[in-house]
């Protein structure tokens, strides 16, 4: 089977055995509904998923483990026992060789192979990765950057308050035709978003014993804070869009209310 999907708005064709169809549909269903006006007109990248029996003398993976990934410029290779994948980012092609046992393990194959390689290929085309959680309300994306524990707890509270999840760990900025933020909410059900036209960034920190507070940072300070984490082009775009510092108190609800108000002002 061959499935074409506009992942992050960038065309990707996945070639795979029929057995992969359910997990591919579960993974990419939201992208198949993306309007044509948001789909890039570039040549599609290609991801090949192959299933092969291991040789008798190949080592078995007997304990849970992740793929070991190595990258040099535009070449990516990875291994997990007899399971291998490689990607040539310059050519826009990736190939994964999976054993029958692993190919049936959706919990491993989807995040560590399909999503990893798909997002890697999509990010070649005006999609700058930014390490941040993302939520959307009223067409505005709120990016949360900070220590993983507090950011994760705040994101979950925002989802419970009916903000749509854009991404849990990484968002992607496109800049060529104006700022747009994209995200892939891995394995999530419920209210999800694929993109937003407006964006604000919040640097999140915990302040136990104090009330939650939100303040906008001056451009110079925002630039200083962000340039340590992301590349210059993305940093400049986010600073122009607005960067805030959010101090989260003991009660999460007021912090969520501040974010909802910020997004609704958009």
Image (cartoon, rainbow, N blue to C red):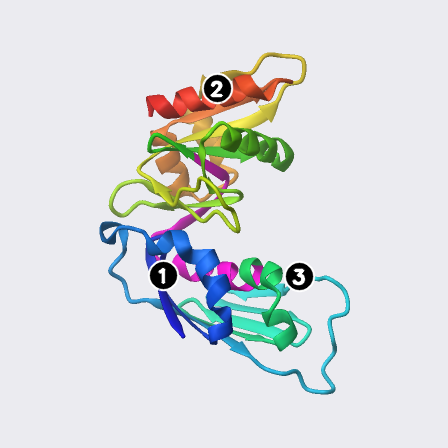
- For the residue labelled by badge 2, is the local secondary structure a helix, a strand or a loop? helix
Please name the residue that numbered disc 1 is placed on.
5
Label 1 or label 2, whichever comes before in sequence order: 1
Where residue 185 sits: x, y (%)?
A: 48, 47
Disc nearest the viewer among 2 and 3: 2
Q: What whole-number distance in Å separates the C-alpha atoms at marks 2 and 3?
A: 38 Å
- Residue 156 placement: quadrant: top right
In-front residue for pair 139/143: 139
Magenta-span inclusion, residue 120: yes
In-front residue for pair 126/109: 109
Q: What whole-number distance in Å separates the C-alpha atoms at marks 1 and 2?
A: 35 Å
Disc nearest the viewer among 1 and 3: 1
Q: Which stretch is magenta? A: 112-135
Label 1 or label 3, whichever comes before in sequence order: 1
Residue in the image at 46% along x and 17% along y: 215
- For the residue labelled by badge 1, is the local secondary structure a helix, a strand or a loop? strand
- The reply to whether callout 1 and callout 3 are in contact (CB within 8 Å) is no
Q: Which mark is residue 66?
A: 3
Where residue 233 sits: x, y (%)?
A: 37, 43
In the image, taking residue 129 as reference, residue 6 lies left or right, namely left
- For the residue labelled by badge 3, is the local secondary structure a helix, a strand or a loop? loop
């Amino acid at each position: 089977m061959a499935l074409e999907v506009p992942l992050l708005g960038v065309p990707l064709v996945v070639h795979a055995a029929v057995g992969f169809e359910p997990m591919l549909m579960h993974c990419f269903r939201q992208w198949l509904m993306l309007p044509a006006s948001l789909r890039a007109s570039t040549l599609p990248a290609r991801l090949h998923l192959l299933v092969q029996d291991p040789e008798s003398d190949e080592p078995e993976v007997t304990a849970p483990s992740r793929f070991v990934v190595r990258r040099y410029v535009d070449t990516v290779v990875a291994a997990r026992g007899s399971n291998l994948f490689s990607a040539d980012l310059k050519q826009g092609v990736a190939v994964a060789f999976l054993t029958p046992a692993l190919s049936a393990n959706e919990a491993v194959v989807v995040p560590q192979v399909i999503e990893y390689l798909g997002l890697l290929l999509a990010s070649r085309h005006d999609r700058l990765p930014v390490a941040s959680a993302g939520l959307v309300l009223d067409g505005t994306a709120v990016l949360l950057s900070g220590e993983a524990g507090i950011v994760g707890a705040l994101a979950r509270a925002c989802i419970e308050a009916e903000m749509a999840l854009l991404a849990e760990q990484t968002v992607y900025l496109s800049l060529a035709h104006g700022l747009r933020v994209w995200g892939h909410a891995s394995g999530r059900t419920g209210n999800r978003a694929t993109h937003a036209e407006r964006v604000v960034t919040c640097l999140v920190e915990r302040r136990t014993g104090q009330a939650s507070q939100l303040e906008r940072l001056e451009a110079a300070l925002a630039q200083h804070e962000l340039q340590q984490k992301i590349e210059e082009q993305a940093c400049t775009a986010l600073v122009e869009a607005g960067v805030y510092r959010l101090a989260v108190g003991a009660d999460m609800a007021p912090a969520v209310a501040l974010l909802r108000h910020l997004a609704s002002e958009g």
